[in-house]
Amino acid sequence: MSDIIVDDPHHGTRESWSERHLLQAIVLLEDAYSFRSIAHKLSPLNILKLYRLYWSKWIQRLLTFIVSCQLLLIFIQYPSSFSRTSDLRQERNRITLPCGVQLAIEFICLIIFYIDVIIRAYLIGLKIARRKPWLIAYFIVTTVSIIDLIISSSLGCQAKTVNIRFLLRPFYMAVISQEMKKIFNSLRKSFLQILSVTILLGIHVYFFSVIGMILFPPARKDSPSERTDEGTKYFPDFADALLNLVVLLTTANNPDVTIPAYSKNRLYIIYFAVFLTIGLYCLMTLFTVIKMNTFKEFFTTSMQNSLFRRRLAVRACFDSLLERQIAPSSSPSPTTTADDTTTSLLTHRISRSTAPMLVVTRMISSTNLPYLLKQELLSTLTRNNERNDEVNWDTFSLTMLSLDADVQKVPIEHHEYSGVWAVIQLIGASKYLTWFGNAIGLINFIVLVVEGSVRYHPNFFTIDLILSNVLFSFCIYYFLESILKLWSLRPKVFFKYFFNTFDASLALALFVLHIVHCGIYGTLSITTSEVIRDARGTATSIWAITRILNLFVIFRAIRSMPHFTNYGIIMGTISDGMRNLKAFIGILICLFYSYAVLGMWLFRGVIKPPTESDIVNATCGSYQQSQYWANNFDDFYSTIVVLYDVMLVNNWGVFLVALREFSTRWSQLYLVSWWFLSNVYILALVLGFIVELFSLNVARFEESGFAQGHHGLANTYFVKTLFHLFKRSLREPSDDEINQALVKYKQLYDNPQEQN
């Protein structure tokens, strides 16, 4: 990047913007786009280049890849999850990486993390780094992991079963994600406020547990009874009563827990009905609402801080553009005089109040912002700038508001043909061809359903011969349709849209599979040999694979949904949820990972393979009788499955009883705490944010008057980030607040020696 020299004929001077000044502005604008803090070094030049390199998308993708490798490594570490089954009754041959290879991969990952934390501390300076709790925790976690790795290398991978570094691995997933860190901080700050409602829920369960023990005392051993006694089975002591009511709160054991008492006296159902009405329908709903509102309050504050960082970075970027070197215009080249008039970014004693248009456009064009956003910034700047040669602060700040907007993709113009080819191109690019294809896809799906329903009909082979030819004709249509669209729109436009790529890939795969099946068996319908092969287990015949792929034509109907307003709102909410809830899913993955590692520590090998007496004497509905032997804690994968089953709360009481039988009563706290954190806490937040996204899409549709956009499609609005979700409730920071923050970061603009 070369210097920019501008002659000022009014003052008879020549002004020079050095590479360092331009790079400072570029870095600050990229900070504004990414909501990063400007509390980092801005000189010398090599620091700025290192800073841009570190935050480039390729380096960040490399860090994401390293974190993913480290997280996934546990699946093939001892005890490996690479076996055909996790059933305790079957022999499990596990594929495990050699211990030396495991330790080497982990060591490389940890060294990269060490380098990462050192670079981060170097870029922001030790003075700022000491005030960054996440950075300090990053260093401590990496140090502890390396120490634990050294101990494992000396003891051996199988001898050391408790590996602390496994439990710390999810931290790296959070530390590289700004949104996940915001959510963690918001969860931490809102926990105390939510604790009061949690205590109220606990008091409710405690109160009814005591009442249940009074109402349903255990039967005496000397009193014969044909029926199961309520007190003996569900309220024998306080711990069992409390646990059974917690399970009842999720309705997982309803009506089993109520039947013994209800069979004895129908009025006993009032006890359970009151408990569920207050606990499930009142307190749990109230808990979700209060938790969502409290979390939203703290998260909105976090988003407000992000907006402030963006505005601060934009102001710092503009002020850095005002810094230049001045020399007499008669001098042969720009030089720095002894009395350097470089402006001060802190005190705002700026002799220049505008920046040349050439400098601003050069700065914007040199950033690593997305191409469409850069084009939007440049066009907005040109449109808003009344003076073609100078840009003032008002114009610059107004232009940078485009950073907050959702930049829409500009439609690409495709090549136009002439004559009869123009008519064919018009058909290929027409929306009516897409609608007709969607209708064909719906008919195709109906034919597949009919074929599946007559699978065991006596005349199935005759019927399937007809239906297979019909399905192959649909396949030919999809193939020809994709070719026509590809020719009409040209590859550059055709493959730009996901559904076009999906339809073409599906049509090609179906066409090839039909041809291969016909070439091997001489027919398009299923053969006797394929029926026998599929009956042995997993359907792996060509016919079965073809039908499974053919089911994906139902996704063609999704393309028709935006043509209807209500479906447009739904599609917008689904799309927003898939993009913006990644951070919440990341939090849930971290929770899964940590609890799975903890579960293997506590309960690995606790559940023993069943004996013949275990199966014969198993209680109806128990872990043994239900044959849940594949659900255990012997490896990471099977532990994840157990936690997933408990999170769904369907029949999770079986796992609680089994864990108590194979271990101790206190082991049940592990699953209860997991249920509370995953199901009651995290998933409820996800549900709340989906409701927020839906409400936002409805509000946008109402503001647009339910208008339709291009080709009659309902306007589908997309929320790019969580910031855009909360943008309407954020307050614009004042100039005084921004100026005070600039003064606060004074050391960042002073001599480089003072930054260390």
Image: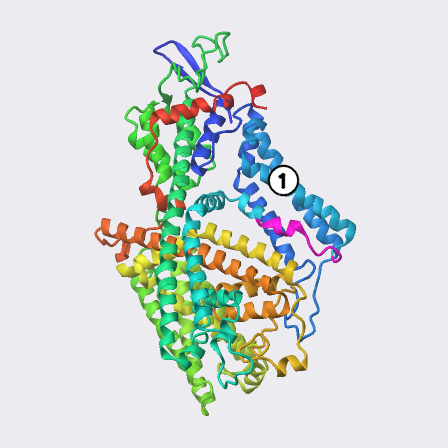
Q: Position of residue 524 (x, y in %)?
A: 49, 81
**Residue appearing at x 32%, y 62% in the figure:** 561
Is 533 above or below relative to 185?
below
Which residue is under mark 1?
140
Closer to the camera in the image, 617 or 754: 617
| Rendering quarter of residue 86 | bottom right
| Residue type at tag 1 | Ile
Colour scheme of this structure image?
A: rainbow
**Residue appearing at x 27%, y 61% in the figure:** 564
- Residue lying furthest right in this view? 154
On-image quarter of the C terminus = top right
Is residue 527 visible from the viewing direction of this image? yes
Closer to the camera in the image, 36 or 644: 644
Disc 1 crowd, CA 10 A, few/some/many (<14, 14-19, 20+): few
- The mark tally for this picture is 1
Closer to the camera in the image, 384 or 244: 244
Q: Position of residue 19 (x, y in %)?
A: 50, 23
Is residue 426 visible from the viewing direction of this image? no
Magenta-tinted stretch: 158-170
Q: Position of residue 162 (x, y in %)?
A: 69, 54
Check if residue 160 falls in the magenta segment. Answer: yes
| Rendering quarter of residue 275 | bottom left
- Residue lying furthest left in this view? 705
Check if residue 634 falls in the magenta segment. Answer: no
SS under mark 1:
helix
| Rendering quarter of residue 262 | bottom left
Q: Position of residue 141 (x, y in %)?
A: 62, 43
